[in-house]
Amino acid sequence: MIELKRISKWVMVGNKPNFILKDINLGIKEGEFVSIMGPSGSGKSSLLNIIGMLDDASEGEYFFLNQAVHGLKEKHRSQLYKQYIGFVFQAYHLIDELTVYENIETPLIYQNIKSSERQAMVADILDRFQIVGKKDLFPTQLSGGQQQLVGIARALIAKPKLLLADEPTGNLNSRQGEEIMDLFKELNKEGVTIIQVTHSEKNAGYGTRIINLLDGRVEL
Amino acid sequence: MIRNYFKIAFRNLWRHRVFSFINILGLSVGMSACLLIYLYVSFELSYDRYHAKGDRIFRVVTNIKTPTDTLDWNSASIPMSPAMKKDFPEVEQFVRIEPNSLLVSRGETKFQEDKLAFADSSLFSVFTLPLVKGDPDKALAAPWQVVLTETSAKKYFGTAEPVGQTLYLTGSRLPATVTGVMKDFPDNSHFKYDILVSMTTWTQKINPGLDDQWEGFNGFAYVLLHDAKDAPGLKAKLPAFIDRHIGKDLQKAQMTFTLDLEPMKDIYLRSKRGAPESGSLPNITIFSLIAVFILLIASINFINLATARSAERAKEVGIRKVVGADRKQLTGQFLGESVLLCMISFLMAVGLCALLLPLFNQLSGKTISHGIFDHASTIGILLLIAITIGLFAGIYPALVLSGFRPIAVLKGSFSSGKKGILLRKGLVVSQFVISIALITGTLVVYSQLTFMRNQDLGFSKQQQLVINFDGDSTIWQHYEAFKQQLTSLPNALSATASSAIPGQGNPTAYSQLENHLGVMQPTNMELFSIDYDFIKQYGIQIVAGRPFSTGFPSDSTRAILVNEEAVSTLGYHSPQEIIGKKFSQWGRQGTIIGVVKNFHFRGLQNAIKPMDFRIRPRDFSFVTVKISGRDVQKTIAAAGDLWRRTLPNRPFAYYFADEEFNKLYRSEDQFGQLFLNFAILAIFISCLGLLGLASYSTLQRTKEIGIRKVLGSSVGGIVNLLSKDFLKLVWIAFLIASPLAYIGMHKWLQDFAYRIDMDWWIFAMAGMIAMLIALFTVSFHAVRSALANPTKSLRTE
């Protein structure tokens, strides 16, 4: 599903390039649950962002479902992204001005799905995550765990093939964290490919494979 | 999708209530001010446009040239326009209007009619002034016929039928028949009268022989041409026309008459000769500019605040991008939001205008509009402007925000770009340029007004009770006795009669005076006919010779006093030299016996012209009683009693000379008030913008402030830090605004013959005011954030 070939990422500091990722080669198959680990500054999030098409690599090739992402125009990439990828953040990143229901609905709006269909889809997922009662609340009225649940629901609403999570439990207490990880595992069983960035060995244990990063390189 | 945007927009507005309020208020106040000014300006421009034949109507005016000066008069003598019709086939019709003021009565109902005019019956066919009752061709054809406006018909007859009734002119003596009732003159007419009397009454009955008097200029004449294009050709034929009719007489008097034709539609605003009502093109230009400026300031504000706030929306944009929004969709959202905001402002502006219109009518002294909703097209244009502002205000944040890299924004590493800051600073500077220029303008206008009010006029206008008896012969025939009675009233110090009161207009007399070369030089003299006490009572100083005195019998017929201006016009170096020189004026010959110090018998807009005093009771029209300051009301009441006993037929009309003189500055007063109001508005809107920006920049620097406080900065130090940047902007604005204001106000001051110098302190003061207001606005936020606990501001994230 994902094929990274000699991916590098650097930023210029003064006149010298400062490498964030160096020469990454990586393949991820459909149905995997991968955990990316490594110390702060090792390039975990950057890698995830490149996979998630939120960021460009400075060098190298990236194939997603056999399409060359590095060669795609912004518009097509956005199309690809919208269709196949869902993103979950450590800080949830919900829109404060929208209710739970509306937050979850937003991706569907951008995919031009009809209102009646949207209603059914959002109702489905609210039901599944057992947050029907919270649908009219605003994010600030929820606990962290509940907010993250909404974040995941939003990421999943458009039925993506790939779920990317950047330290999804980083801001949660351990009980809430476990719930989220259990949910991830369940989703993975249903066939969603998951790539998560995490600091915690325990969370990494939920996955099927661990990739260790250090100073921008994959540790083998 | 649209619904989603609306929801977001409204929730955003609500969440940031204060800023939304500032934003919407600023814009709607700006728009309503602009709309009001637009109504005012378009009313001024609409003057005399209602005449269906307006394009073909011209006013006949006369330039009178003597060897010393030229008088550009707005009138033509009685025979001129009929002769033009007879001589030139281009002229289809003529109308003459001879303004007058008469006592009109119906039984016991008596009114002094100051807005009365003698007019030709062609008035109704040339102008679009419809008759409600009566035959337009015959209504003013024969002598002793009167047409009333609807308002004055009601005044005299109530609900009774006026046509066919009799009114008495000049009290009781001259009966005239009401032959028609016309609609009131429209508000936007440069002449308005309450009562029209047939012209033949004036030229055949009251002043027989007037039909041949080419040299008397009192009334107005209009000609209707078959084709407006004939006007230049006709003008070219007018010198020969004058020469043919009165060339010989003029040559003898060393005068030339030059006739000119002024297009009807230019009279109100563009004629330098004036009219019964005239407007000011510079004022209209200034107000139009102010309107544009205020709208500009308000829009700048709106754009500025929207841009400043864009930083706060960055996170939302990031998220939207992550969940799949593309650039077009985001741009649409932001544009839509700002247009929505503008629409709200627009609705508020229209509401505000509807509320303020009556007040504005009062302030501007006329009914510029009866209701805001009479102007659908104007409101439509404003709506378009509102949408445009919305698009402009939205485009910057829309483009900038939608171009963000979502990951950078979500990581919080986003900082509002340097470019945006420069743009915002530029906008703040331009706002303050406008505000400071307006403040400077206001200060100049008020300084000039104060100067005009406080200037020594050269005569004493205090405690002078003026009674207007309109030349009633009962008074001037027995005025010595009447004067005696007046002065014996309690608190009355002295009394004097005259043909005119300084400031209230007086005739100009063609005269010949002996100049320094011993030649009789034709000169136009402003003329006051007075009695022996006038000079003393009005405190006018004699600089050479002597005042009139009953000790010299010849004073009453063969002597005049002139002013210093006449002395220099005739080429003398000192006032003494003119004493004993000869004069000839309106059939009188004699010698100049004295010179009075120059005094302002016109408002300070006008330069002092050569004038003379003479004794002639027949001309008297006013009695002035000098009273002591005590029991003023009682004195007036006593004078009124005496009046009613002496002249039971005539209403007791009085005023105080100083109050009446100050009315000469009424239009300047109104101008100043409007200017002041708009300046306040401009600075208010600018400050709203500044307030919004300051609070945002303070918000953005919360962390910096926290760190500085931890490092030991004082509250004062932080306030200074935050205010400095903004004050610098105001300072730059001041430097730009001052020269602009100087140029503008210098031009405005040119309308005044006597004017103030624009001292440096006016500019300094305007700058100070702006600076203080800005400082106050900015420090409001600066102090609050400087006092905040730094641990709070540093704990974010």
Image (cartoon, rainbow, N blue to C red):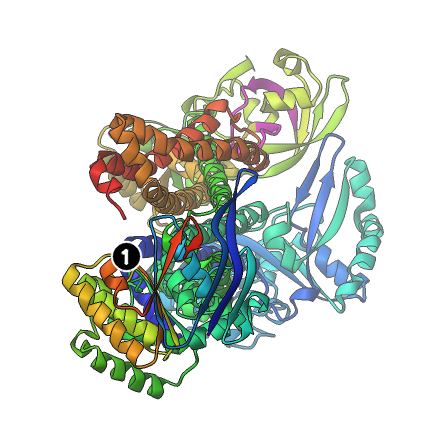
Q: Which stretch appears magenta?
A: B589-612
Identity of the residue furthest to the left in this view: A175
| Quadrant (top left, top right, bottom left, bottom right) of the N terminus of chain B | bottom left
A1 lies above or below B756: below
Local SS, label 1: helix
Whether residue B723 is visible: yes
Viewed as shown, does residue B576 lie left or right of B461?
A: right
**Residue B557 screen position, x and y as percent:** 58, 28
User: Which x, y percent locates residue B106?
Assistant: 38, 63
In depth, the one of B280 and B769 nearer the eye is B769
Which residue is nearer to you in this view: A50 or B548? A50
The residue labelled by disc 1 is: B17
The chain containing the residue under callout 1 comes to B
Residue B627 visible within the image = no
Task: Please check the rendered image and state whether residue B593 is part of the magenta-colored stretch, yes or no.
Answer: yes
- The percent coordinates of residue B714 (x first, y second) are 26, 25
Q: Is residue A99 magenta?
A: no
Answer few, some or many: residues within 10 Å of disc 1's Cα (few below 14, many 20 plus, some between 14 and 19). few
Q: Position of residue A87 (x, y in %)?
A: 36, 67
